[in-house]
Image (tube, coloured by chain):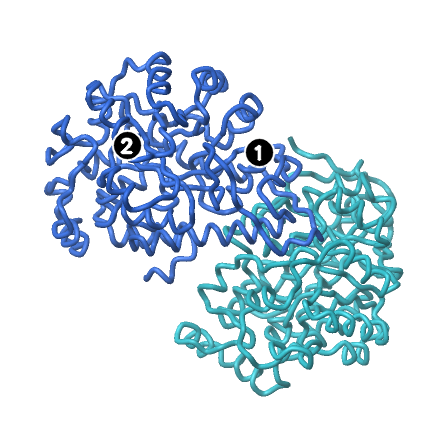
């Protein structure tokens, strides 16, 4: 099986499973607790159906939309995800280059292994920086200032990760960053020599943007769960968020908003966007899926800020349904991470190409010339 | 597999299965008829989703709740279950000490294998005695008096076991109490020698609350279903419950209430709480799950008595959902029994500690710092 045979999410996932040591595969693939929410995030798209219009003379549909003040060629973009260097030795650079090629956003995590400045040097495409609020305020301020200096277009503040979710697959596989060899994981690493070779022969693994500020950023082996619980500030509140919005002074989103009440408050503190997300089912299991919650939030605040649906997207039709229910764009993590794992930049490009082709084809089948024609009249919910 | 490999309910279940002779494992694990209700008790939680609120500053979480006038540090407790020394040689001693460590309620069954007096001398934290209404009135009086003398805080009358449920796994495995060696069970006992050694060497198996009154309390082998059907008084009615309630003279609860009508009657006869419960799916198969029924009952009597949701809990988020609907506390048996079987007191402590850690984490992720902040705005029911 090779990248060119990867036609959909499952293909990329299967190939990634072959290529990655199992602790790393399961870190991407897993969710929290019983993974009910992880599963629901995708299943919820199946509870409504698309209603096409025929004979619409669509021609070549326009798939562009505007978010964070930037026109993008596709209504999807790469969610910020941590530690991409674990999945492919080129990590964030590969993702950023692929996103630029497709004219859409690459997003950088606070926990990226590449610096803000490096990415800015290699990519002129739209860029979003994702911020975690650390207990050490100087880390937070430093990240904001550097992102601004480096020409990032938007910033999002993650608000659903005050404490790490209970990712039981990581307990079992002993997943740590950087990877630690335990008796348990040794076997799996030994069976994936190509990954180990690439990992060891390329640039050193570090949390590049926070490395100088915290010893956890370098080579102390720690689990992500421990990192989150030690470094992030659980007392973070609306005042802190407002301070960051002002300090950033540009297009800004809260990532991980689920309630209507919070969506309204996001407007009050000056956000231009929200990302409806449950962190890919990796935090609070049993929480509502973004798509289930989308319509209510869109009805309440859709005319006042940009709504981005984050999580569960596997197919072009999922994107169409989300846009019809009121989202401006969708973002996703796992799908491009599996692409990254199996083929670096080329893998991410194949993922985006597949999604582009699906969205393009489905727009034609729906009889829509541009994305604004997707509205609630195109959807019927099953009861 | 070791105790440290147990990260959740299912892990404890797996380890218990390895350690217990199969008739005993299946006695815990099984339920009535086709076990539809048993499964629904847990799957009901998946028909509703949590909707968190963010940016609320959630450094310190208070999980305490007050039921029956007693403040518990946790919003869940160990429901009374029978025959605990069959599962681990420390039995109720292990569970009681673990409950004490977390300052939560410990429920002691009338069919316990350690006496109320011993438990009372061992733990000073809140205790509940779970009572079966026997035909023998002398036995009933004795249970009440001993529990009172031993300073138990709550008396819970079980009202859903008027006859034994049809636990077909027990029929197949030949489960009796005390365990009887049959040809079919012999193999299973023989393959778990540690259980057998501990069972035979760590003190005689008995039912101290019953033994002076009925031969089933001692060494005669009987099945639980048979015990319920022959020893308990099937004519028990609301008058009997009311009399017991005033005879007890303290916090009194009915365990196994499912209808709104009965919940209201419980208020009328002077109960201070009810457990919405179907006995862990072990009695009437096809009956509604406690969580499905919780909302109606809370709406009807939640402002008058403590409504406790019992059954199906396997996760902190399950508890969060029940508490959001309006339960004052959550309770469960299998919740800690697999852990007891897996590793005694250390197992129960690990299990309770994990639920506590889950709840603390889930509260933070929900944006709530205390139980009273949970409400129905946090929930959305799916339209299916």
Can residue B184 be seen here? The reply is yes
Earlier residue among tags 2 and 1: 2
Name the side, left or right, on which B95 lies relative to B187. Answer: right
- Chain to which the residue tagged by mark 1 belongs: B
Give the labeled residue for mark 1. Answer: B325
Can residue A316 be seen here? The reply is no
Name the side, left or right, on which A268 lies relative to B306. Answer: right
* Image quarter of the N terminus of chain B: bottom left
Please name the color used to draw chain A: cyan
Depth order, front residue of A284/A316: A284
The image shows residue A14, relative to residue B238, as above or below, that is below
Disc 1: CA contacts within 10 A as few (<14), some (14-19) or many (>=20): many
Label 1 residue SS: helix
Q: Which mark is residue A249?
A: none
Residue at left offset 30%, top offset 51%: B16
Disc 2: CA contacts within 10 A as few (<14), some (14-19) or many (>=20): few
**How far apart are the two marked residues, 2 and 1, measured between alpha carbons?**
36 Å
Label 2 residue SS: helix
Q: Which mark is residue B149?
A: 2
Q: Say whether marks 2 and 1 touch (CB < 8 Å).
A: no
Residue at left offset 78%, top offset 74%: A142
Colour blue maps to chain: B
């Amino acid at each position: 099986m090779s990248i060119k045979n990867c036609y959909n999410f499952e293909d990329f996932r299967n190939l990634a499973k072959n290529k990655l040591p199992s602790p790393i595969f399961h870190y991407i693939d897993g969710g929290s607790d019983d993974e009910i929410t992880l599963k629901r995030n995708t299943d919820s798209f199946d509870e409504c159906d698309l209603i096409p219009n025929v004979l619409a003379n669509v021609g070549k549909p326009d798939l562009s939309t505007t978010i964070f003040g930037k026109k993008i060629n596709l209504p999807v973009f790469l969610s910020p995800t941590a530690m991409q260097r674990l999945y492919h030795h080129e990590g964030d650079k590969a993702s950023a280059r692929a996103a630029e090629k497709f004219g859409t956003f690459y997003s950088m995590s606070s926990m990226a292994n590449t610096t803000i400045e490096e990415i800015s040097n290699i990519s002129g495409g739209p860029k979003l920086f994702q911020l975690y609020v650390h207990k050490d305020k100087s880390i937070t301020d430093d990240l904001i200032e550097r992102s601004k200096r480096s020409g990032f277009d938007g910033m999002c503040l993650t608000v659903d990760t005050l404490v790490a979710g209970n990712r039981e697959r990581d307990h079992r596989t002993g997943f740590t960053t950087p990877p630690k060899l335990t008796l348990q994981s040794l076997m799996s690493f030994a069976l994936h020599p190509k990954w180990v070779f690439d990992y060891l022969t390329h640039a050193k693994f570090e949390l590049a943007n926070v490395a100088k500020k915290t010893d956890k950023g370098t080579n102390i082996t720690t689990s992500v769960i421990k990192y989150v619980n030690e470094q992030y500030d659980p007392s973070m509140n609306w005042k802190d968020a407002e301070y960051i919005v002002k300090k950033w002074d540009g297009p800004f989103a809260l990532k991980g908003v689920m309630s209507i009440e919070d969506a309204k408050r996001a407007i009050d503190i000056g956000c231009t966007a929200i990302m409806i997300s449950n962190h890919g089912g990796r935090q609070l299991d049993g929480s509502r899926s973004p798509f289930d919650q989308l319509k209510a939030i869109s009805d309440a605040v859709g005319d006042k800020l940009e709504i981005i649906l984050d999580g569960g997207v596997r197919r072009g039709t999922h994107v169409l349904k989300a846009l019809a229910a009121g989202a401006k764009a969708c973002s996703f993590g796992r799908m491009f991470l599996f692409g990254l794992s199996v083929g670096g930049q080329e893998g991410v490009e194949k993922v985006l190409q597949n999604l582009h082709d699906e969205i393009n084809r489905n727009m034609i089948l729906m009889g829509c010339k541009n994305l604004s024609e997707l509205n609630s009249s195109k959807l019927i919910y099953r009861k | 597999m070791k105790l440290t490999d147990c990260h959740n309910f299912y892990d404890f279940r797996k380890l218990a299965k390895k350690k217990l002779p199969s008739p005993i494992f299946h006695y815990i694990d099984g339920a009535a008829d086709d076990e539809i209700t048993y499964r629904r008790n847990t799957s009901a939680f998946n028909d509703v989703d949590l909707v968190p609120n963010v940016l609320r500053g959630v450094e310190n979480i208070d999980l305490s709740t007050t039921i029956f006038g007693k403040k518990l540090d946790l919003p869940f407790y160990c429901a009374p279950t029978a025959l605990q020394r069959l599962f681990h040689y420390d039995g109720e001693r292990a569970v009681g000490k673990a409950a004490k460590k977390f300052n939560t309620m410990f429920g002691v069954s009338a069919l316990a294998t350690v006496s109320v007096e011993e438990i009372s001398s061992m733990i000073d934290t809140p205790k509940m005695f779970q009572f079966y209404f026997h035909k023998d009135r002398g036995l009933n009086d004795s249970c009440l008096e001993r529990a009172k003398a031993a300073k138990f805080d709550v008396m819970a009358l079980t009202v859903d076991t008027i006859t034994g449920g049809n636990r077909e796994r027990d029929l197949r495995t030949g489960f009796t109490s005390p365990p009887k060696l049959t040809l079919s069970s012999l193999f299973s006992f023989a393959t778990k020698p540690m259980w057998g050694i501990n069972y035979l060497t760590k003190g005689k198996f008995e039912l101290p609350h019953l033994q002076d009154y009925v031969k089933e309390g001692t060494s005669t082998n009987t099945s639980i279903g048979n015990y319920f059907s022959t020893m308990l008084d099937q004519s028990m009615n609301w008058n009997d419950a009311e009399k017991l309630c005033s005879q007890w003279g303290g916090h009194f609860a009915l365990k196994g209430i499912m209808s709104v009508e009965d919940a209201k009657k419980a208020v009328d006869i002077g109960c201070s709480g009810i457990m919405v419960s179907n006995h862990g799916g072990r009695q009437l198969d096809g009956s509604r799950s406690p969580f499905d029924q919780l909302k109606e009952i809370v709406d009807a009597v939640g402002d008058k008595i403590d409504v406790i949701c019992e059954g199906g809990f396997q996760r902190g988020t399950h508890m969060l959902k029940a508490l959001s609907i309006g339960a004052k506390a959550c309770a469960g048996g299998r919740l800690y029994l697999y852990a007891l079987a897996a590793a005694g007191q250390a197992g129960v402590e690990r299990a309770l500690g994990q639920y506590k850690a889950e709840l603390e984490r889930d509260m933070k992720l929900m944006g709530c710092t205390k139980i009273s902040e949970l409400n129905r705005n946090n929930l959305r029911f799916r339209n299916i």
